Each structure stands twice: as C-alpha cells, then as structure tokens.
Amino acid sequence: MSRGTIVITGASSGLGAEMARQFAALGYDLGLCARRTERLDELRTEILAAHPERVVAVKQLDVTDDAAVFTVFDAFAAEFGGIDRVIVNAGLGKGAPLGTGKHAANRETAVVNFLAALAQTEAAMSIFRAQGRGHLVMISSISGLRGMPKTLTTYAATKAGVAALAEGLRAEAVPGVDVSVIYPGYIRSEMNDRIKHEPKFMVDTETGVRAMVAAIEKRRAKAYVPDWPWIPIGFALRTLPLPLVRKLL
Ligand SMILES: NC(=O)c1ccc[n+]([C@@H]2O[C@H](COP(=O)([O-])OP(=O)(O)OC[C@H]3O[C@@H](n4cnc5c(N)ncnc54)[C@H](OP(=O)(O)O)[C@@H]3O)[C@@H](O)[C@H]2O)c1
C-alpha cells in the first residue's frame, strides 16, 4: 500500500536523491525530476530493487523553464491521480562577492534558487488548490536566516526569499494545504564536495537527510536540521550582531 505520492525536484544527486531513497523506504511513491535523467534512471532502478512494490516515475526537467515546470508537475499529477507532497529542492550554490565581475554566477543562482522555486511553488499550489489538499516543502538553508558575506551573499538572499514565499502561503492558510520550510545546515552533497576545508558540523548525506525527512513527516512549519547544532546556531544567527554572524558559518 502506498502512503502517498511525493514529487521531488533536483532528485538526481545529494539531498534530493537521498530523500527519494528514504521516502521510498517509508512507503511513498515518487515523481523525480532533474536535468540529468541518466542519474534519475539509475536512482529509480536502485529504489525499485530495494522496494519493488513502489512506483517511481522520472522526468527530465530544467526548473528554469517555467512552462516545463507546469507541464511536468501536471503530468505527474495526471499519472498518479494527484500529488500529496511537492519538495522544492533543486538548487545551485554558485556565487561571488557582489561587484566583482561575476554577475553571471550570482544571476544563475538567483534564477534557479528563487525564480524557478517560484514557478515550482505556483505549479504545486495550483494542483493543491484543485485537490483541496497537499504539502508544500521548501528547501531553504541556515544561511538564509541572515545576510551573508562574499560568495554566500546571493545564495543566502535566495534562501531567505523562498522561506518568505512559504511563510506568505502559511499566512494565507490555504484550506487543506500544509507548508514546511526546511533550513539544512551543512550536509555532504555535490554542492559542497569541492570545498577545500570541510565546514564545521558537516554531516554525511544519509544522517542529514534523515533529519530532514523526520521534520517533513511531522509537517513542521520550520525546521533547522539536524537539530544539533543548528537549532542553537539558528537562534544565534537570528539574534547576534552582524560582525559575530560572519564568524558563525
Ligand atoms: N548540502 C547542503 O549542505 C545544503 C545546505 C542547505 C541547503 N541546501 C539546499 O538543498 C538543495 C539540494 O542541494 P544539494 O546539497 O543536494 O546539492 P546537489 O547535490 O548539487 O543537488 C542539486 C540538485 O539540483 C538540481 N538542479 C540544479 N539546477 C537545476 C536546474 N536548472 N533544473 C533542474 N534541476 C536543477 C541538480 O540536478 P541536475 O543537475 O541533474 O539538473 C541536483 O539534483 C538545494 O536547494 C540547496 O540549496 C543544501
């Protein structure tokens, strides 16, 4: 028996792929999308080998193609007869200090992490409003809690932006629709595996995603994950003066 259907964007690597594995193990059917379909096909084969009773559909999607986002989400909804949860996860970690000639990298991050997240939210909410139910999950970041310096400036702004979108929807209180914002700390993935010095408190993908999945399953409105050390760091980030904030991440 299926516990429901979850659509995950950015499922070809890192947190998205691991969420797919862990939600399949919990009994959910999956609609997975990303640009690298060979990765999605491999993941589908791996999940079905472990859980042959599950249904896993994969579709190619570049989330910066607005029309494709609506088409792909609607196609998953038609295929599964509805969608119970959408996880807006696709993201990019490029960035450079503002005004240093790297506008293209900052723009790309803003487009993928914010504008494309907006399109995904519109597409998901249109399905949820029609169904009268659904769970929207926005993957933000601990770095979205405050303005961040240098290479993180644009990335952090996009992550604050998506959290604000989700909070706006929570304020609207759409009948039958729950909205969760997940603020991961450092979790090993493709996004950070080229960083020379491993950040403090980095956890492996499985451990980090286990904390994300637990918070999502509880439909928490906000979750800093894993709890330790990110709940106290999150509190400090929101309250300390900027010169101290700079030293925390
Ligand atoms: N890892 C961390 O420590 C951490 C911390 C806080 C927040 N996050 C957030 O967690 C989310 C997942 O990141 P990750 O760490 O798992 O990084 P990752 O391993 O680099 O995965 C990023 C995913 O996003 C997809 N993606 C990127 N651009 C896309 C596009 N234009 N269209 C469709 N899919 C696209 C990639 O798929 P394709 O390249 O195949 O399209 C990939 O599946 C991101 O939103 C990130 O900001 C991560």
Image (spheres, rainbow, N blue to C red):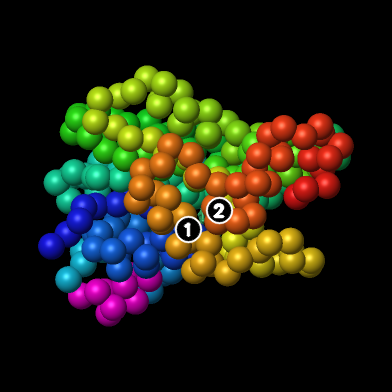
User: CA separation, marks 2 and 1?
Assistant: 8 Å
* 26 up-or-down from 47: above or below: above
> In the picture provided, is 134 more to the left or to the right than 81?
right
**Occupied quadrant, residue 56:** bottom left
Residue 127 visible somewhere in the drawing? no
Is residue 118 on the magenta stretch?
A: no
Q: Secondary structure at mark 1?
A: helix
Q: Which of 7/180 is in front?
A: 180
On whether ligand 1 comes within 8 Å of the CB at mark 2, the answer is no
Percent across and percent down for residue 72 are 31, 46
Amino acid of disc 1: Ala
Mark positioned earlier in the residue sequence (2 or 1): 1
Q: Which residues are magenta?
A: 43-52
| Residue of label 2 | 227
Q: Nearer the viewer, residue 208 or 44?
A: 208
Judge whether residue 50 is colored magenta: yes
Residue 17, image x, y percentages: 44, 64
Label 1: how many residues lie within 10 Å, few (<14), some (14-19) or many (20+)? some
Given the current orientation, which residue lies at the most extreme top position?
Answer: 172
Q: Is residue 84 left or right of residue 161?
A: left
Residue 131 sits in quarter:
top left
Residue that badge 1 annotates: 211
Q: Is residue 31 visible?
A: yes
